[in-house]
Image (cartoon, rainbow, N blue to C red):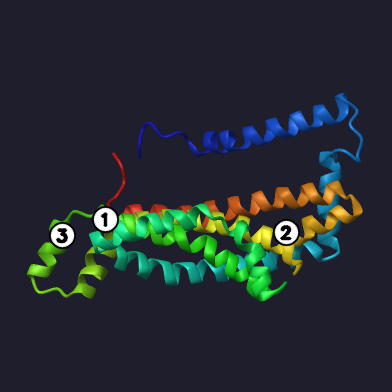
Amino acid sequence: MNSGRLPRPVLALLFVVPFAVIIGVWVVVKHALHVSDDALASPAGVLAAARDLTGWGILPFDVSRSLYRLAIGSVLAAAIGIPIGLLLGTSRTCVAMFAPFLRFFQSVSGIAILPLLIVWFGFTEKTIQIVILYTALVPVIFNTMTGVRTIPPVYSDALATLGGGRLHVIRSVYLPGALASIVVGLRLGIGYGWRALIAGEMLVGAGGLGFMIFDARRFHDLGQIIAGMVILGALYLVIDRLVLAPIEAATIARWGLERT
């Protein structure tokens, strides 16, 4: 165990402190400045809205629908993006050719292409899934490709000299060597895909947390809007801490990539 690492209780406390500060400022602004409920819901009002949405069955339904969409888009992005990134990364020419191409499309966010997707596919589930896939796919490809290029050529040359074919080199050298970069790409892709998912649900109106937040504006229900925002952030923290971070840690432990 690293002697410089903070104990878990201290880390947990540090994790909570910023949120406690935000809630404290929120309470002060709400009550000290006498801000009306029409301008800002109180923390108690937000909790009440979340409790009501849960009791009505709306919140569990919308959460499960959003998570299902994110899972489908993320799995597709990994299944498509990792092989493409591995193949591109094996060629210096392909990297020089496609790196600017990928940066271009990474700068054109999924939210920007939503109007085009709606024109093509309408207000349908397909539109939401495509915008998630598009947004998550580019970081996965780019980071996988970059990870392959960081592997010293001596490893692939040695395996090729021993008779290893191209697929064997990719499986035994490039994939494990680029795994840390691949995980980073997945974390980025899922984070970007999460934002694109919410925007897609807002515009398409096919249920989910994004639609729940956007629909609450019709009733000027600030408690529901803020509750939805808090749940969005909390869910992504759970996904990142309980799913993605352990995968990254296991990758570092398995392949000996831990920094000293």
Q: Residue furthest top?
A: 32
Q: Real-space Cα distance between discs 3 and 1? A: 12 Å
Disc 3 target residue: 155
Front-most of 100 and 225?
Answer: 100
Nearest-to-viewer mark from 3 and 1: 1
Give the total number of marks visible in the rendering: 3
Q: Real-space Cα distance between discs 2 and 3? A: 47 Å
Asked whether residue 182 appears in the rendered view, the answer is no
Q: Position of residue 109 (x, y in %)?
A: 56, 55
Q: Quadrant of the N terminus?
A: top left
- Give the residue displayed 13% in from the left and 57% down from the top: 154
Q: Earlier in the sequence, mark 3 or mark 1?
A: 1
- Give the residue displayed 31% in from the left and 65% down from the top: 88
Q: Real-space Cα distance between discs 2 and 1? A: 38 Å
Asked whether residue 252 appears in the rendered view, the answer is yes
- Give the residue displayed 28% in from the left and 58% down from the top: 148
Pointer 2: residues within 10 angstroms few (<14), some, or many (20+)? Answer: many
Q: Earlier in the sequence, mark 2 or mark 1?
A: 1
Q: Amino acid at mark 1?
A: Arg
Q: Going by the image, does 208 lie left or right of 90?
A: right
Q: Would you identify the image quadrant in which residue 110 lies?
A: bottom right
Disc 1 target residue: 149
Disc 2 target residue: 210
Pointer 3: residues within 10 angstroms few (<14), some, or many (20+)? Answer: some
User: Is the C-beta separation of discs 2 and 3 under 8 Å?
Assistant: no
- Give the residue displayed 69% in from the left and 33% down from the top: 20
Front-most of 140 and 17?
Answer: 140
184 over 84 or under it: above or below? above
Q: Amino acid at mark 2?
A: Gly
Q: Going by the image, does 105 lie left or right of 13?
A: left
